[in-house]
Image (spheres, rainbow, N blue to C red):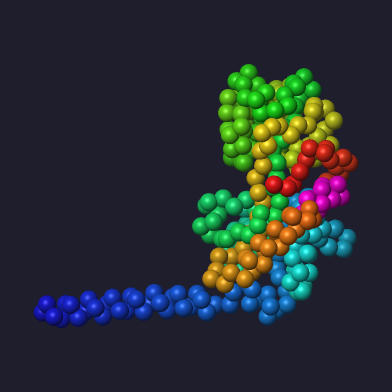
């Protein structure tokens, strides 16, 4: 009886090992992103309306924008066609990548939770967090906002809130769900300032002359933006994107694409010298 039990245990262990090896082999045998791109001579890129990153011409249906220009250069270097695949927005990117709907997306922050579902390549640029004051407040650096008497408006549940907690933890936070509510709070004097990305801040300042000064506080607060890609055994597509990102950042090409995109697609007429999309 003991012999039979031992034999059955050994057979079960062997079966489980075979199943595990078969699953691994199956995953390794599946067509990788690199192989699919080379077979089809096209690379699929996630897009949705979000100026100045992604902008669709209503007449021609053509896509433009800072991140679209980066994707075009990726396809050019790969010597393949670029296919624009429309998705519902930032919240759908992880699913679109992990299910193979797209080969890559751009402008993503590589958070730990996202890294459990997909992989990343880059960074492709750095995005700064800045402040915009109401006309009666003269804060310039984070220490000026790090005071309980200073009311700073932020969007609930965003990186804006995380960065404010990091650089001005003593500030009194006024939390809102929409940027339009934040702008109203600051322009009316209910809040002394707001903080968000340089893109959103400059667009808001351009459209709302009643707001006060635009500042790039010190120390610099910036987070990297990445390409999002599928997690897979074949490293060739990730390696290509990593080297593409390093090359284009070193040449200043992505800095130029970001600034040109802001000027062309966001109605911004002037970009302060203090604004940078480099590390």
* Residue located 27% across and 77% down the image: 12
Q: Is residue 165 magenta?
A: no
Relative to 261, is 209 above or below? above
Given residues 222 and 150, the one toward you in this image is 222
Q: Quadrant of residue 254?
A: bottom right
Tell me if 97 is positioned left or right of 74 in this view: left
Q: Which residues are magenta?
A: 254-265
Relative to 177, is 69 above or below? below
Q: Quadrant of residue 84?
A: bottom right
Rendering coords of residue 121 (x, y %): 63, 59
Q: Return the residue found at the far left.
A: 1
Asked if residue 151 can be seen in this view, the reply is no
Asked if residue 100 can be seen in this view, the reply is yes
Taken as a whole, is the magenta stretch helix, strand or loop?
helix
Q: Quadrant of residue 76?
A: bottom right
* Residue located 15% across and 81% down the image: 4
Given residues 263 and 79, the one toward you in this image is 79
Rendering coords of residue 130 (x, y %): 72, 35
């Amino acid at each position: 009886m003991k012999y039979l039990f031992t034999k059955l245990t050994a057979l079960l262990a062997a079966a489980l090992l075979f199943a595990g090896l078969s699953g691994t082999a199956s995953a390794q045998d599946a067509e990788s992103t690199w192989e699919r791109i080379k077979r089809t001579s096209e690379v699929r890129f996630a897009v949705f309306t979000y100026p100045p990153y992604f902008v669709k011409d209503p007449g021609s249906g053509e896509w433009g924008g800072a991140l679209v220009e980066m994707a075009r250069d990726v396809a050019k270097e790969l010597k393949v066609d670029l296919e624009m695949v429309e998705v519902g927005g930032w919240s759908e990117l992880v699913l679109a990548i992990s299910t193979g709907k797209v080969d890559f997306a751009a402008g993503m922050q590589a958070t730990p939770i996202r890294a459990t579902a997909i992989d990343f390549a880059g960074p492709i640029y750095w995005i700064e967090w800045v402040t915009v004051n109401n006309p009666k407040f003269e804060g310039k650096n984070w220490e000026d906002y790090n005071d309980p008497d200073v009311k700073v408006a932020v969007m609930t549940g965003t990186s804006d809130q995380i960065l404010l907690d990091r650089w001005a933890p003593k500030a009194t936070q006024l939390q809102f769900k929409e940027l339009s509510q934040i702008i109203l709070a600051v322009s009316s004097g209910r809040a002394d300032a707001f903080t968000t990305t340089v893109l959103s801040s400059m667009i808001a300042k351009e459209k709302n002359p009643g707001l006060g000064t635009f500042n790039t506080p010190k120390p610099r607060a910036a987070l990297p933006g990445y390409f999002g890609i599928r997690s897979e055994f074949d490293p060739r597509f990730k390696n290509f994107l990593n080297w593409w990102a390093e090359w284009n950042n070193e040449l200043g090409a992505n800095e130029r694409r970001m600034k040109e995109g802001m000027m062309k697609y966001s109605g911004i007429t002037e970009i302060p010298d203090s604004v940078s999309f480099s590390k």
